[in-house]
Amino acid sequence: MYQDLLVWQKSMELVRQVYILVEELPKKENYVLSDQMRRAAISIPSNIAEGSGRSSRSEYKRFLEIARGSQYELQTQLQICVMLNYLKKDDLEDVFFLISEIGKMLNSIIKKLNIPNP
């Protein structure tokens, strides 16, 4: 089951952390950056889950690639928050580390899915 995947579990933790972080953003960003960050974060475990329920390796891989794209998107949005002085980079070290871990895990699974079945 997808719930047993460490990458899914870490992605769910990332969602929790992002929801806490967006509360620190200015109210003017409630419907722009905050919303986009929540959607990108939610997309990661959601696509891992959806992909695991697909019937083929290629479909599973495609959904993992979408999750990886959302991971990059979220990372960029957090960097935008730092650039705009909405959040401090030092306060995001744990989140950036978690995002990096998730990315490495996704890359590893995608790489394994590229190996043909014996």
Image: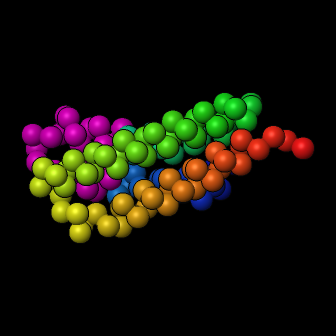
- Of 36 and 113, nearer the camera is 113
Residue 50 visible in rendering: no
Left or right: 5 with respect to 20?
right
Q: Is residue 19 magenta?
A: yes
Q: How many marks?
A: 0
At 74% from the left edge and 31% from the top edge, which residue is drawn?
56
Query: Which quarter of the rendering shows the C terminus?
Result: top right
Left or right: 62 with respect to 57?
left
Left or right: 28 with respect to 35?
left
Type of secondary structure dominating the magenta stretch: helix
Q: Is residue 23 magenta?
A: yes
Residue 115 visible in rendering: yes
At 58% from the left edge and 40% from the top edge, which residue is drawn?
64
Residue 100, position in %: x, y? 45, 58
Residue 52, position in %: x, y? 66, 40
- Of 8 and 102, nearer the camera is 102
Note whether 87 is above or below 111 in the view shown: below
At 34% from the left edge and 50% from the top edge, which residue is drawn?
75
Residue 110, position in %: x, y? 64, 45
What's drawn in magenta, residue-wise? 18-39
Residue 95, position in %: x, y? 36, 61
Left or right: 22 with respect to 94?
left
Q: How is the image coloured?
A: rainbow
